[in-house]
Amino acid sequence: MATLISPSILSADFANLERDLGAISTADYAHVDVMDNHFVPNLTLGLPVFERLAQVSPVPLDAHLMIDDADRWAPQYVEAGAASVTFHAEATAAPVRLAREIRRMGARAGIALRPATPVEPYVDLLAELDMVLVMTVEPGFGGQSFIEGTLPKIRRTREAVRASGHDVWIQVDGGVARSTIARAAEAGANVFVAGSAVYGAQDVAGEIAALRAAAQDAFRG
Ligand code: DX5
Ligand code: ZN
């Protein structure tokens, strides 16, 4: 299984998003954090901005919806051009119906789990999903420190994916940097979101390459 890097544009310059998407053209995806000031105490951007980002991005968009009522909104992000749409388990009434709808429309379907949300209720539903996002910080803000206590959940998720026989990616998001990425990869994550580590680097492309190399070395699929 490939290890993939998805830099979060939450740490980009919001007045220069096209330029900052261009800076991560060597990444596998661009991670776009959509926050509604209800599901999380922060507000970022919505559909009209997302749609333009999809038109100008050199890499496919990985939408992370930190919004209430995901059942209503997530399909519209597929329509707006997302290659992958991840909704929160805590914000959907019908995760399987929603994942099926996202896939039917042609995007990858992901489910995100806050640090205190267990993966166990979802392990029998892995056939319906393309990705599980194990949040490694409380969602809402960039620049927080990696929660080490999420590592056992990453391991249990990888074991469940292996047992299921399905090709489900495991994404980690929050506090991912050179100092933490190997532990997440060793635990079984293969898709790495990094905001401040990538956009805070002097050499953005060099940082993406360094993160990818560290992840590849440590990944246990
Ligand atoms: C947090 C967001 C993350 C955030 C990560 O709620 O989901 O994608 O941008 O930022 P860093 O990498 O700085 O922790
Ligand atoms: Zn995110």
Image (tube, helix red, strand yellow):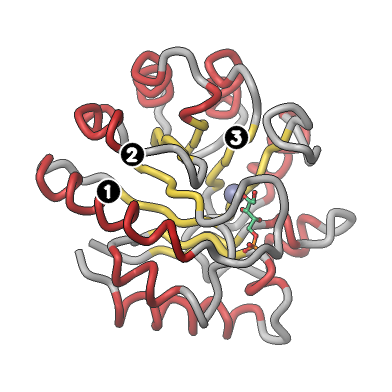
Instruction: Using the image, determine if residue 90 lies above or below residue 198.
Output: above
Q: Earlier in the sequence, mark 3 or mark 1?
A: 3
Amino acid type indicated by mark 3: Leu
Q: CA distance from mark 2 to mark 1?
A: 7 Å
Image marks 2 and 3: residues in contact by CB distance under 8 Å:
no
Residue at left 28%, top 72%? 219
Image marks 3 and 1: residues in contact by CB distance under 8 Å:
no
Residue at numbered disc 1? 157
Instruction: Using the image, determine if residue 181 lies above or below residue 121.
Output: below
Image marks 2 and 1: residues in contact by CB distance under 8 Å:
yes
Q: Position of residue 167 (x, y in %)?
A: 20, 46
Residue at numbered disc 2? 119
Q: Earlier in the sequence, mark 2 or mark 3?
A: 3
Q: Nearer the viewer, residue 212 or 134?
A: 134
Q: State left or right for residue 15 relative to residue 42.
A: right
Q: Quadrant of the N terminus?
A: bottom left
Q: Residues within 10 Å of mark 1 (few under 14, many from 20)?
A: many
Q: Position of residue 38 (x, y in %)?
A: 74, 27
Residue at numbered disc 3? 65
Nearer the camera: disc 3 or disc 1: 1
Amino acid type indicated by mark 1: Thr
**Tag 1's secondary structure?**
helix
Amino acid type indicated by mark 2: Val
Q: CA distance from mark 3 to mark 1?
A: 21 Å
Q: Earlier in the sequence, mark 2 or mark 1?
A: 2
Q: Nearer the viewer, residue 117 or 38?
A: 117
Residue at left 69%, top 81%? 201
Q: Position of residue 197 (x, y in %)?
A: 64, 74
